[in-house]
């Protein structure tokens, strides 16, 4: 009985793990997306810093505004690093590639 039960238990476990992996990935992407949305809210709240403009003269900003701008970009870098560490793989499966493409602007 053990000769049949143990391999069957292993197969059920492996099958369950494979089914959970897409759900785990989806949850990771949802968390990252939520954090990115919060970042965009922060950018919107600080619109006077012109964070979405490529060519802005920082001479027009006060020292405090320059500090805020620097911190907000630090948050973006941190979020990007976290996303990279959680998601990067040499070969992406189709689901992961689709989710990553949804981040492109």
Image (spheres, grey):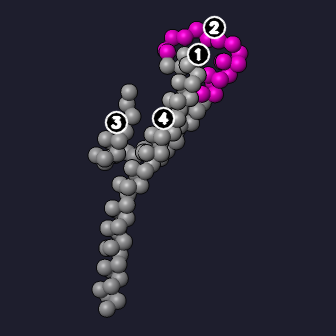
Return the disc, 1 or 2, that comes first in the chain's sequence.
Answer: 1
**Tag 3's secondary structure?**
helix
CA gap, disc 4 to disc 3?
Answer: 16 Å
**Percent x, y for residue 26?**
39, 50
**Tag 2's secondary structure?**
helix
Question: On the image, numbered disc 3 is attached to which residue?
Answer: 101
Q: Is residue 92 above or below residue 18?
A: above
Question: On the image, numbered disc 4 is attached to which residue?
Answer: 37
Q: Nearer the viewer, mark 1 or mark 2?
A: 1
Q: Is residue 75 above or below residue 9?
A: above
Question: On the image, numbered disc 1 is attached to which residue?
Answer: 48
Q: Nearer the viewer, mark 3 or mark 2?
A: 2
Question: Which residues lie in the magenta part?
Answer: 53-73
Q: Are marks 4 and 1 in contact (CB under 8 Å)?
A: no
Magenta stretch, overall SS? helix
Return the disc, 4 or 2, that comes first in the chain's sequence.
Answer: 4
**Percent x, y for residue 58?**
61, 11
Return the disc, 3 or 2, that comes first in the chain's sequence.
Answer: 2
Q: Nearer the viewer, mark 4 or mark 2?
A: 4
Q: Is residue 71 magenta?
A: yes
- 43 horizontally vs 63: left or right: left
CA gap, disc 4 to disc 1?
Answer: 19 Å
Question: On the image, numbered disc 2 is attached to which residue?
Answer: 60
**Tag 1's secondary structure?**
helix
Q: Residue at x 39, y 34 (%)?
A: 103
Q: Is residue 87 above or below residue 62?
A: below
Disc 4 crowd rating (10 Å Cα; few below 14, some 14-19, many 20+) is few
Return the disc, 4 or 3, that comes first in the chain's sequence.
Answer: 4
């Amino acid at each position: 009985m053990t000769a049949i039960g143990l391999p069957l238990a292993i197969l059920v476990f492996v099958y369950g793990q494979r089914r959970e992996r897409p759900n785990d990935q989806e949850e990771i992407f949802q968390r990252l997306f939520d954090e990115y949305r919060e970042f965009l809210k922060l950018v919107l709240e600080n619109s006077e810093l012109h964070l979405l403009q490529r060519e802005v003269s920082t001479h027009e900003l006060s020292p405090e505004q320059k500090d805020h701008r620097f911190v907000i970009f630090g948050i973006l870098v941190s979020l990007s690093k976290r996303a990279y560490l959680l998601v990067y793989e040499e070969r992406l499966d189709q689901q992961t590639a689709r989710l990553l493409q949804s981040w492109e602007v």
